[in-house]
Amino acid sequence: MKRIAIALAGFTVLALAATGTGIAQAVPASTTCTSVLVAGTYRDVVVPTGASCIIQAGVTIEHDLIATSPSFLVIGDVAAPVRVGHDFTLTANGPASIYLVCNTAIGHDLIFRGGAAGGTGIGGAPVCAVSAGHDLSVVGAQTLEIRNATAGHDLVVRNNLGAFVTVVNNRAGHDALCSGNGNFGGSGNTAGHLNTCNS
């Protein structure tokens, strides 16, 4: 009887493994967003060139979020935070409509190189606040607003040229560095060390 019980137990495990019932499912290594990414847990997320991607409230990305010249990218809303475990990097090399980030926490760096013709927004009202555990850097964007964002180390806003570049009520644990921006307006920004972001 003991051998039968062991054999049946082994069969049950194999059946569960085959059907997925009762077995924790592995998170896919990488997910591509070309429409809507619904609330859930993902390993890495990639937004490819030309894609339109909406990342809904309640999404957790365990490692990196990487976007390369998407045409449209909106991340988060006030309903629940979006969490990125490591880096969020965006590189924009062509025309695009708009990039918006709201109520999002990044474990390490938030790095934007380039930006959307229609505008790039990071943060906003306090309920839309954005944080990066290390650096928050936006270089070479066009119209830009960063408001109520926190960088654990440096906030860097450089060489952004558009209808306006607004940097308001942000905090940097180390330096807040703003230079080379057109139509720049900065106020209420604080830093633990050097601060050049208040005009």
Image (cartoon, rainbow, N blue to C red):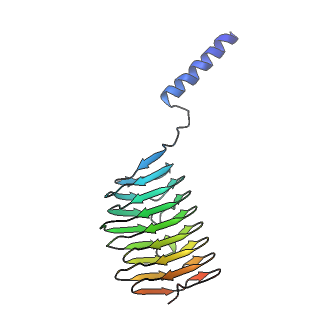
Q: Residue at x 60, y 19 (%)?
A: 10
Q: Residue at x 41, y 74 (%)?
A: 140
Residue 91 vertical position relative to residue 160 in the rendered view, above or below: above
Residue 159 vertical position relative to residue 34 in the rendered view, above or below: below
Location of residue 73 (image quadrant): bottom left
User: In this view of the protein, which residue sits in the foreground, 50 or 98?
Assistant: 50
Q: Report the residue that reaches farthest toward the right.
A: 2
User: Would residue 133 be found to the left or right of residue 53 on screen?
Assistant: right
Residue 45 vertical position relative to residue 171 in the rendered view, above or below: above
Location of residue 13 (image quadrant): top right
User: Would residue 60 be found to the left or right of residue 69 on screen?
Assistant: right
- Measured from the top left, where is residue 178 in percent x and y? 50, 82
- Measured from the top left, where is residue 4 in percent x and y? 64, 11
User: In this view of the protein, which residue sits in the foreground, 148 or 47?
Assistant: 47
Q: Residue at x 50, y 71 (%)?
A: 137
- Measured from the top left, where is residue 71 in percent x and y? 32, 62
- Measured from the top left, where is residue 1 in percent x and y? 68, 9
User: Would residue 193 be found to the left or right of residue 65 on screen?
Assistant: right
User: Would residue 171 be found to the left or right of residue 47 on screen?
Assistant: right
Q: Residue at x 56, y 37 (%)?
A: 24
Query: Does residue 148 show up?
Result: no
Q: Report the residue that reaches farthest toward the top.
A: 1
User: In this view of the protein, which residue sits in the foreground, 76 or 193?
Assistant: 193
